[in-house]
Amino acid sequence: MRIFVLGGAGKMGCISVQSLAMDDRVDEVIIADINTEQAQIVADYIDSPKIKVQKVDITDEENFVTALKGSDVCLNAAIYYMNLNVMEACLKAGVHYTDMGGLFYGTREQLKLHARFAAEGLSAVLCMGSAPGVPNIQTRYAADRLDSIESIRIYDGIKPPAPDDPRFSYAVPTILDELTVDPMVFENGEFVAKPPLSGFEDYWFEPPLGMIPMHLSLHSEVATLPVTFKDMGVKECFFKINYWGMAKNTVEKIRVLTDYGFTNAEPVNVKGISVAPRDLAISLLADYVHSADDLLAPPTAEPPDWAKEIVTEIRGTKDGEDITYRLGTLTCKGALPTGLAPAIAAIWLAEGRVEPGVYPPEACLDPEDFFKELEKRDIITKVTVTQKI
């Protein structure tokens, strides 16, 4: 089994590489990245004979397709703007596909490739990070046990860093989009836009997290879950997170930059040179991201002081009775779920466990098998069922 990890030298891709290299089902892992120096650092850190480094430029389509050929699956850990391009390359190379999400709008466009993938006998599982990914499968678990669904409420709780920690928890461009683009919610059976950083509520998570303030954010779960379970009567779906795992002070600083136009994509003239303020901001903020050493799980050392619980509350009915399922997936092992979830999807794709076509996770992955895979890495999912006596 040969897995091609595009962006494998990046902050989340390196976790996928490590997860795949540790799995006995995988024979070879390709760290495919334009930054071969960083890719080699990741390869040396993980230190597995399964890993090979390959320089890949997504914008060079011909060479990219050639590089893909011979792999069973492409795990796309590159920035989500490139998802459609990568899927087109997979179609040409005859390679299955998975990614970490398309931030709502991108996911909707990707799903339109279903017929073309099916015609080629290829399978794609979209939105397989920790979130999106885990919440989708949590919802599927509950849906399999309910007659109807009224609401799907997702809470992605991350242990807050120190107030003076200036770092971004993952890709700067993605966080800027999540911070500035209106979150979409499914409300009273319709998709509705809400202001960024709105809808605050305090939510209780498992220790060591406790009570955390949560707010709305644009996310792909909302793009697919109300559609997948439309026939079950879904009326509400939202996704909330706590400052994207960043310090509140850091987010407030970025909001000030936004207010002054530094996240605008429209170029401005600076001394005769056309510059997009957003590109400048991304370049300047690139150094304020966790390093691979912060994110990869050391084989012997204690994991970083980090915790995350992904909770989905699904309210519905069974045999005429109101029932609420609460599924919580908890880890204290760093950012592991974000890289492990797509690694599991990639292995299942290579094993032929997904029918040809393009699917969101809830439409094609078995929940109980998935949670058992997570449990092997000390990522535990618990379910609570609430109903009248």
Image (spheres, grey):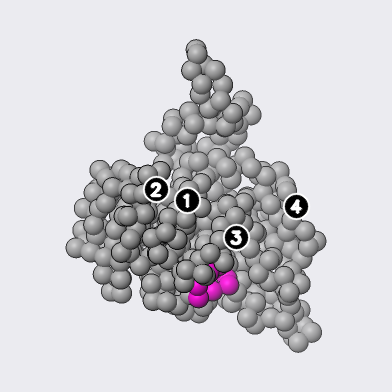
Q: Residues within 10 Å of mark 3 (few under 14, many from 20)?
A: few
In this view, the mark in front (2 or 1): 2
- Which residue is labeled 1 in the image? 85
Give whichever of 174, 31 is nearer the camera. 31
Tags 4 and 2 in contact by the CB under 8 Å rule? Answer: no
- Which residue is labeled 2 in the image? 61
Q: Residues within 10 Å of mark 1 (few under 14, many from 20)?
A: some
Residue 94 numbered mark, or none: none
Q: Position of residue 379 (x, y in %)?
A: 44, 69
- Which residue is labeled 3 in the image? 112
Q: Earlier in the sequence, mark 1 or mark 3?
A: 1
- Amino acid type at circle 1 is Asn
Local SS, label 4? strand
- Which residue is labeled 4 in the image? 192
Local SS, label 3? loop
Q: Earlier in the sequence, mark 4 or mark 3?
A: 3
Local SS, label 2? helix
Instruction: Please tell me which residue is depicted at 56% across the width and 21% down the height of the picture.
Output: 268
From the viewer's perspective, tell me whether residue 77 is left or right of residue 235: left
Q: Is residue 292 magenta?
A: no
Whole-angstrom CA distance, mark 1 to mark 3, is: 13 Å
In this view, the mark in front (4 or 3): 3
Whole-angstrom CA distance, mark 2 to mark 1, is: 9 Å
From the viewer's perspective, tell me whether residue 281 is left or right of residue 153: left
- Amino acid type at circle 4 is Val
Give whichever of 160, 155 is nearer the camera. 155
Q: Earlier in the sequence, mark 4 or mark 2?
A: 2
Instruction: Please tell me which residue is depicted at 77% across the width and 83% down the height of the picture.
Output: 321
